[in-house]
Image (spheres, rainbow, N blue to C red):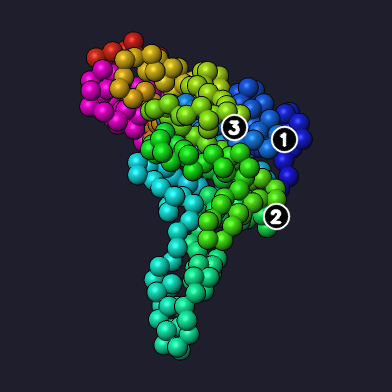
Amino acid sequence: MSFPTSVDELEAALVQCDYIPERSLTVAIHLAIQMGRPLFVEGEPGVGKTEIAKVLARISGGDLIRLQCYEGLDASHALYEWDYARQMLAIRLLEARGDDVEVHDIMSEEYLIARPLLQAIRRSSEGLGTVLLIDELDRADEEFEAYLLELLSDFQITIPEIGTVQATTPPIVVITSNRTREIHDAVKRRCIYHWIDYPSIDREIAILHKKAPGTSQALSAELATAMNRLRDLDLFKAPGVAETIDWAKALQVLGEVQLSPDGIDATLGVIVKYEEDLETVRAAGSTAFP
């Protein structure tokens, strides 16, 4: 799995894949790749955190393995679990033949179901290019972070019944968080950290040119300026870049070539997702839009 060897080359590759990064983010990605460290990115929803892993997989030609975190996530869903149904069937077959059942007969890799973390380590141990995305780690319980420490430190997983599976070439690891809770320092210390903020108006215009190419220069500028103002309002959930792109596409579908009061009101549901926020935006009126 090969990546550009300089920051400038990496930035060009990201842009070619329609990802417009800030320079500081490009440097963080470059350091994580070259140093063999996980990249830990935090930021508000919709600012492009998850997209980093997808783009890196495209650049490298490697496979993307995604672990979507959620409350209650445990080792059996993230690391591995045993195929109990096959194990029971094997025991019955052995008993039917009159063979003595030994532990090693059913506690082998043949009966192991690999989940995303083990899949990534296995692929890397076989020399296969892999980008591992651990998405929205803040949604998982704090206890789950302990399972990650061995992986992030040594890129290996220990299976008591079998032994240690270690990656000969570390996978590219991207961890994202919306910061709904703090992630433990033990995890962060093992990573290259970067905070992704909302983009500047100019950068958001450049993103629209890549992600919604049918949007005119004038409308792109209006949308980026409007979003910049909306994010300054006291909203429960400020709209991210993903909503800006959706807004541009929605206006294209409706045949709108510029922002108008009617067009804005008809499409507010594309960018604002809570009734209270809709009322706040409508109350702001013309001050929220160019």
Q: Residue at x 40, y 67 (%)?
A: 84
Q: Which residues are magenta?
A: 254-281
Residue at label 1? Answer: 34
- Please tell me whether residue 200 is drawn above or below residue 186 in the rendered image: above
Alpha carbon distance from label 2 to label 3:
23 Å
Secondary structure mostly seen in the magenta stretch: helix
Q: Position of residue 19 (x, y in %)?
A: 59, 34
Residue at label 3? Answer: 190
In this view of the protein, which residue sits in the foreground, 142 or 289? 142
In this view of the protein, which residue sits in the foreground, 215 or 226? 226
Assign a secondary structure to mark 1. helix
Which sits earlier in the primary sequence, circle 2 or circle 3? 2
- Counting labels gives 3
Q: Quadrant of the C terminus?
A: top left
Hey, what amino acid is under mark 2? Gly
Q: Position of residue 248 (x, y in %)?
A: 43, 31
Which sits earlier in the primary sequence, circle 1 or circle 2? 1
Q: Examine the rendering and report whether any part of residue 263 can be seen.
A: no
Q: Nearer the viewer, mark 1 or mark 3?
A: 3
Checking the image for residue 127, the label placed there is 2
Residue 189 is one of the magenta-drawn residues: no
Direction from residue 153 to residue 248 in the image, left or right: left
Q: Residue at x 63, y 42 (%)?
A: 154
Hey, what amino acid is under mark 3? Arg
Q: Residue furthest top?
A: 287
Direction from residue 70 to residue 218 in the image, left or right: right
